[in-house]
Image: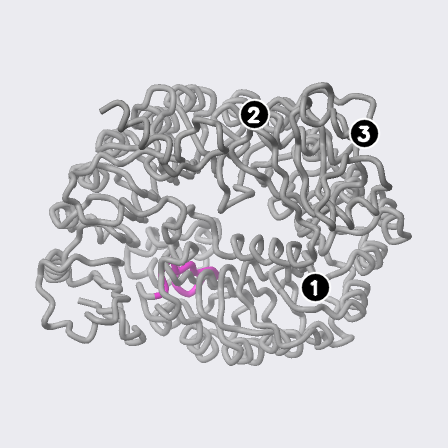
Amino acid sequence: MTYFPEEVVEHIFDFVGSHRDRNTVSTVCKAWYQVERLSRRTVFVGNCYAIGPERVMARFPGIKSLSVKGKPHFADFNLVPYDWGGFALPWIVAAARLCPGLEELRLKRMVVTDDGLELLARSFPNFKSLVLISCEGFSTDGLATIATYCRGLRELDLQENEVEDHGCQWLSFFPDSCTSLVSLNFGCLKGEVNGGALERLVARCPNLRSLKLSPAVSVESLNKILARASHLVDLGTGSFAVDHRTDVYHMLMNSFPKFKSLRNLSGFWDASPCCLRAVYPVCTSLTVLNLSYAPAIQGDDLIKIICLCFKLQKLWVLDSIGDKGLAVVASTCKELQELRVFPCDIYGAGTTSVTEEGLLAVSSGCPKLNSLLYFCYQMTNAALITIAKNCPHFTRFRLCILDPGKPDPVTDQPLDEGFGAIVRSCKNLRRLSLSGRLTDQVFLYIGMYAERLEMLSIAFAGDSDKGMIYVLNGCKNLRKLEIRDCPFGDIALLKNVAKYETMRSLWMSSCDITLGGCKALAAKMPRLNVEIINENEETYEFEENLSDLHKLEKIYVYRTVAGPRNDAPDFVWTL
Amino acid sequence: MEAEASYVKDTELRLGLPGTHAPAETRGSKRALPEDDEKSHGKSKARVVGWPPIQSYRKNSFRARKAEAEAAGSYVKVSMDGAPYLRKIDLRVYRGYKELREALEDMFGCFSLGEASGAEGCTGSEHAMAYEDKDGDLMLVGDVPWEMFISSCKRLRIMKGSEARGLG
């Protein structure tokens, strides 16, 4: 291949899409490395501390799209302290200097500031798409600068961010000349919204296909918007509860039938059952339905809507759907690929309304099911074994039995055999979350059978170090391992240290890891950052005085070529 | 010994309605751990940090709306005689008595609410729906227009048919 001119090689590389393939291709020889790096258009950085931003931009000066992830996944559940890190600014600064052609930026679990957003808005003349997921640190002022300076912006997608509300005017900052929006999602904003500005913006963007509104957008506003945006494919409603005797309600009932292209529905923040009827006319063409933020919709109303959705591929609901509702899903939604069932009553006193029966029904009725997130109060081995047989195509299987360490209620056994059946049957399983009573045995199965597993989440499980060792010695494609409240200690941590360089990261909290164990790990593996997160104020000032036997509450270990980070707060020590 | 034991039992503090023998709530199992493990596994199940693993974003949005609705005063407790726990519902989401009854049947169905009968308040010979109004009086559900009902209802009670017959 080295006697082909560069242009030809570059053209061939155009067909090499995935990051991993391109990374592989670049290691073949120097010539290929050069061609590849100059022609690379998309870069994905799974851990913002694995490499410095300047190094990325210097290697790939031509990138148009950059994705960066910051905090560990368990930050979603408040296990990572607020100012741990994950700052976006260095990435924006480096890109502004070295990659001015940047068009797209995707950030997940990072701290983004208004200053960063302003720099972003002013530095990239061709900027088209900003996606922020589970980020924090910015306000509506930052959004206003994006609206002002990003001419030709096509996508502004804000998912589940903590955004400080500094007023509703940011939408008015989109100039009249802005007509390019294709996708606008501000569902996570908590403050008031300027309805008029929103309606005008929607009216002047003929290419708008995806619009997701925040709870503050009234039904009245929604009606006006829907009247102007009949080409929408993806809609997230704003508020969805009005008195059924009003004109607004009647208008709402008549707003949906004309949507020929609508495929995805979400929002429904406070939806009432009578308003939900408005969407019946579009149900038969829906592929995605998210009702997981509508606690007022009970089982029967959910059933009424689901039995119309026979093309549904993705369904997110609350457990108020009940096993009965899931049986309806099973008999109606034959195209279903992804199901998420969230608990309605998190602090509840007792039973939930979905059990293993509901999941069994869906597994039996929906042959294409490959992605699951299921919260329930109980699960049995028998059910899991049957589910594994019914659905060998799972790529993502996350089961959360709400009672930590709960065994099979019928046999009082741990759920080792059930989960074992899942990993044995689902050869393409990439992500797995375990729960319930589990012994080391389940980890033996995982190590043996879960060959494609990339991410594993473990809580309140296992008996001894052997459990963790089985996993580390087994799963050859493991990238992320996150563990909480398990009896795994230094022996497990140190058994297979080379493994961590093949993985993105390891998180362990409330386990039996000691300071001495971490020191040993850091000493053996210089290319890992071994971070100790110590929120106990009494001890962190006396680092030197802590004995090696001191048990550590939280550790985060990740491979890096950037060395220890220079932005770590006081309570994070990198060994 | 036995007399002592029964004395202890009589004065024992338990969760559960008086007259029932429901034991105190012992949900979940203990993990198979050595006794001297000083870790947090013994923590109360209800308040383990970061458990259940639900995004704080989702938790917060529910909490905020629940607080809002509760502040707006439309959430009322619903108790059913014989059930070990109560529920809370937002009366504003229902259009009328029929929807309310259906919703309650859904919620308490596992405790066999019984078939709906003709009369609004009675759900068959087994149970009747009553409510506590602003004055604290126990009233039969169904006598007044729906709007008046939701503004005056402070608490709902599903009563055993035998007790409810006295109400009408």
- Disc on the earlier residue, 1 or 2: 1
Q: Amino acid at mark 2?
A: Cys
Q: Which residue lies under the disc numbered 1?
A: A181
Please, what is the three-letter code of the amino acid marked with disc 1? Leu
Query: B14 and A547: which one is in front?
Result: B14
**From which residue to which does the magenta span run?**
A36-48
Q: Nearer the viewer, residue A573 or A234?
A: A573
Identify the residue at horizontal 39%, vertical 63% (top origin): A70
| Percent x, y of residue A370 | 49, 33
Chain hosting mark 2: A
SS under mark 2: loop
Residue that badge 3 annotates? B120
Q: Position of residue A253 (x, y in %)?
A: 85, 45
- From mark 3 to mark 1, how far is it between C-alphas? 53 Å
Q: Which residue position holds label 2?
A: A366
Residue A354 seen anywhere in this rendered image of the structure: yes
